[in-house]
Image: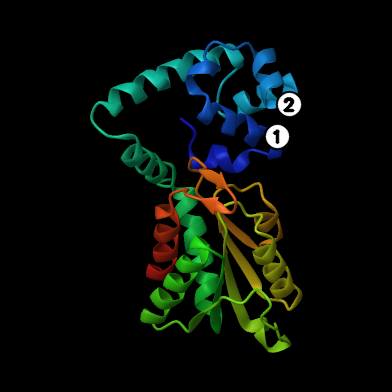
Amino acid sequence: MFNYEILKSLNDMEMLVYDYLMKNKEKVTYMTVRELADEVHVSTATVMRFCRKAGFDGYSEFKVKFKMFLNEEKNKKHQVNEDIQEIQEYFQKISSEIHQKELDEIADVVRDAKQVIFIGLGTSGILGKYGARYFSNLKKFSQYIEDPYFPIMEGMSDAVVIALSVSGETEQVVQMASDFKKNKCKIISITNKSVSTLSKLSDYSLSYYVTDHDMGNHINTTTQIPVIYLIEAIGRRL
């Protein structure tokens, strides 16, 4: 129902509406536009813009189609469990020609760089190590920098930095990306949402838009299968 192009077009406030919908699917079908706006703490105009960007004439049409969408989801759940369904929905979102062209463009940038540097912390750091090894297997000089205080020198301007962060707000990763950018490195970010500090400072951003599972205390169990796919998809294009 919400494909990659739609999600990419949403601004900060509209993304809040989308997040609320995904976490309160059944509840939303019984809410008025004012009730939804109040719950999300946005204006009714924001909700209406969200509906139009999603391809509906107004909120009433959106509710009808959203109920139909939920009924279809329920039927699918008899065949596929929720974990697998989420991954299937992700791959449906990214099957568009626009998304594939984005990957092609990013691969061109990576191919032209003399070196690729992956950065990320926690689970994203583990995937950064994997990405560096995967690219190296493909004969592309790559490394993962684990130390957030690693000295960034002027000679690194020929590098492309791939920054990984689920939230896009990990302070150390954002700071490292900013420092690399000051040294004229190209920044490619892979985050769960396009509305984030890391995405905004990047030259290229890829977002995967899956349900966020932030457990607090710096623990996040959001699926990282999309990140592995994106790393490998870029690598296969080199």
Location of the C terminus by quadrant is bottom left
Instruction: Name above or below for residue 155 compared with residue 236.
Output: below
Q: Residue at x 68, y 71 (%)?
A: 176
Where does the image place residue 165, in percent across and percent down from the top left?
Answer: 57, 58
The residue sitting at the front extreme is 217
Query: Looking at the picture, which amino acid does disc 1 mark?
Result: Met
Quadrant housing residue 75: top left
Marks 1/2: CA–CA distance: 7 Å
- Badge 1 density bin: few <14, some 14–19, many ≥20, Cα 10 Å: some
Q: How many marks?
A: 2
Quadrant housing residue 92: top left
Instruction: Name above or below for residue 155 compared with residue 90.
Output: below
Q: Residue at x 75, y 23 (%)?
A: 43
According to the image, label 2 marks what residue? 42
Q: Nearer the viewer, residue 101 or 7?
A: 7
Instruction: Name above or below for residue 224 compared with residue 122.
Output: above
- Mark 1 secondary-structure assignment: helix
Q: Residue at x 64, y 18 (%)?
A: 36
Residue 72 placement, left or right of 64: left
Query: Looking at the picture, which amino acid does disc 2 mark?
Result: Val
Where does the image place residue 48, in percent across and percent down from the top left?
Answer: 67, 21
Numbered tag placed on residue 97 in the rendering: none
Of the numbered discs 1 and 2, the one sitting upstream in the chain is 1
Instruction: Name above or below for residue 32 compared with residue 127.
Output: above
The residue sitting at the bottom extreme is 155
According to the image, label 1 marks what residue? 13
Residue 138 placement, left or right of 128: left
Q: Are marks 1 and 2 in contact (CB under 8 Å)?
A: yes
Where does the image place residue 89, in percent across and percent down from the top left?
Answer: 39, 39
- Badge 2 density bin: few <14, some 14–19, many ≥20, Cα 10 Å: some
Where does the image place residue 29, in percent across and percent down from the top left?
Answer: 52, 14
The residue sitting at the left extreme is 79
